[in-house]
Image (cartoon, rainbow, N blue to C red):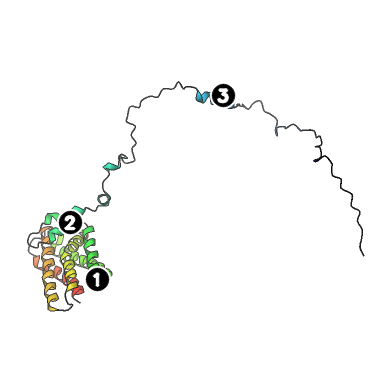
C-alpha cells in the first residue's frame, strides 16, 4: 500500500541568481581588551622599503689582521699545500720501494733503511704472495696471515730470550723485518707457476730462496739490535725454520 507525501513546490527566479539578501556586517573585535601598558610598534612597509634603498652612512673599517679563512688546527684552506693521502695515512711509497730493493741484494744490505718499521710494505708482499698462490690453485690467504703472525711472535720471544735485558726488538719491528724478507718467497712463488710441481728444480730453487731470506733477515736483526754476533747462529736457525715453512706452501 503506497503512502503519499506532500512535497512543497520549488520556485526558481526568472532573472538568474537570486539577489543577495542584505545582512548586517559585524565589525571585528579584539579577543582581549587592549592593555595600554604594553608597548606596540607599528610596521610601515613603505617606510621600510625607503630605508633600505637609501644610501647608508656606515663605513666599513679595515681589520688589523688578514681575512683569509682558517680551519681548526692552524692550517689554511688552501688545498695545494695539503700532503698526499698516503703520507697522511703514514704510507711512504718511496721508503717502501727502497726497503724492497734493498732485500734483492743479500750481500749488500742496508740496515739503516729498516730502522723505521712499517707494516704497509710487508702487507703488500704478503698479499702478492697470496695472489701467486691463488694463481697456482691454492687459497692460502688465511694461512699466510696466520703463519706470519705466529712466526713474528716466535722470533720475538726467541730473540728477547737470547738478548736478555739488552733486547730492544719490539713486535712491530719484528713483523716488519719478517715481512720484507718474504720478498724471495714471493719471487719463488712466481717462478713456481712455470715449473713442474714436485720436481727437483723446484726443491733446489726453494732451498736457495730460503737461504736468501734467512741471510737477509738474520743480518737485519743482528745489525738493528744490540745483541751482537754471539747469537747469530741461533737467530739464523730460527729464521731458517720460518722461511722453510713458507716454502712448503709453494712446493706442495
Residue picked out by circle 3: 47
Estimate the spatial distance between the alpha carbons at disc 2 and disc 1, rounded to whole Å: 24 Å
Give whichever of discs 2 and 1 has the lower sequence position.
2
Q: Circles 2 and 3: CB distance less than 8 Å? A: no
Classed neighbour count for the residue bearing mark 2: other residues with Cα under 10 Å, few (<14), some (14–19), many (≥20): few
Q: Which sits earlier in the primary sequence, circle 3 or circle 1?
A: 3
Q: Residue at x 14, y 79 (%)?
A: 199
Residue 241 lies, in percent from the top left, at: 15, 71
The image quarter in which residue 62 lies: top left
Q: Which residue is mark 2?
A: 97
Q: Measured along the vertical axis of the image, is residue 81 above or below residue 89?
A: above
The crowd level at tag 1 (other Cα within 10 Å; few <14, some 14-19, many 20+) is few
Left or right relative to 34: residue 91: left
Left or right of residue 233: residue 10 = right
Residue at left offset 54%, top offset 23% = 50
Front residue of 8/63: it is 8
Per the image, label 1 sits on a secondary structure element best described as helix
Q: Quadrant of residue 172?
A: bottom left
Q: In this image, 40 relative to 238: left or right?
A: right
Question: What secondary structure is marked by label 2?
Answer: helix
Q: Quadrant of the C terminus?
A: bottom left
Is the C-beta separation of discs 2 and 1 under 8 Å?
Answer: no
Q: CA distance from mark 3 to mark 1?
A: 83 Å
Residue 118 position within the rendered picture, expressed as x and y whole percent measured from the top left: 21, 56
Indicate the quadrant containing the N terminus: top left, top right, bottom left or bottom right. Answer: bottom right
Answer yes or no: is residue 167 visible. no
Instruction: Give the numbered dot on residue 163.
Output: none
Whether residue 99 is visible to the viewer of this picture, yes or no, is yes
Which residue bears the numbered disc 1?
135
How far across and how far down the image is residue 213, in percent? 13, 66
Amino acid at each position: 500500500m503506497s503512502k503519499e507525501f506532500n512535497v512543497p513546490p520549488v520556485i526558481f527566479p526568472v532573472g538568474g541568481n537570486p539577489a543577495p539578501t542584505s545582512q548586517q556586517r559585524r565589525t571585528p573585535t579584539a579577543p582581549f581588551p587592549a592593555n595600554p601598558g604594553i608597548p606596540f610598534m607599528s610596521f610601515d612597509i613603505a617606510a621600510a622599503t625607503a630605508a633600505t634603498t637609501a644610501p647608508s652612512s656606515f663605513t666599513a673599517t679595515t681589520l688589523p689582521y688578514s681575512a683569509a679563512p682558517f680551519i681548526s688546527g692552524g692550517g689554511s684552506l688552501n688545498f695545494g699545500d695539503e700532503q698526499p693521502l698516503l703520507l697522511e695515512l703514514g704510507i711512504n711509497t718511496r721508503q717502501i720501494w727502497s726497503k724492497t730493493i734493498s732485500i734483492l741484494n743479500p750481500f749488500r744490505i742496508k740496515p739503516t733503511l729498516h730502522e723505521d718499521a712499517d707494516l704497509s710494505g710487508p702487507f703488500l708482499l704478503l698479499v702478492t704472495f697470496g695472489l701467486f698462490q691463488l694463481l697456482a690453485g691454492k687459497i692460502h690467504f688465511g694461512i699466510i696471515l696466520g703463519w706470519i703472525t705466529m712466526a713474528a711472535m716466535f722470533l720475538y720471544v726467541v730473540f728477547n730470550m737470547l738478548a736478555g735485558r739488552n733486547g730492544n726488538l719490539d713486535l712491530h719491528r719484528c713483523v716488519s723485518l719478517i715481512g720484507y724478507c718474504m720478498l724471495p718467497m714471493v719471487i719463488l712463488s712466481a717462478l713456481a707457476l712455470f715449473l713442474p710441481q714436485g720436481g727437483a728444480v723446484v726443491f733446489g730453487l726453494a732451498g736457495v730462496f730460503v737461504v736468501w731470506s734467512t741471510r737477509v733477515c738474520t743480518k737485519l736483526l743482528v745489525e738493528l739490535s744490540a745483541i751482537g754476533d754471539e747469537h747469530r747462529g741461533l737467530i739464523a736457525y730460527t729464521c731458517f725454520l720460518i722461511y722453510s715453512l713458507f716454502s712448503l706452501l709453494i712446493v706442495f
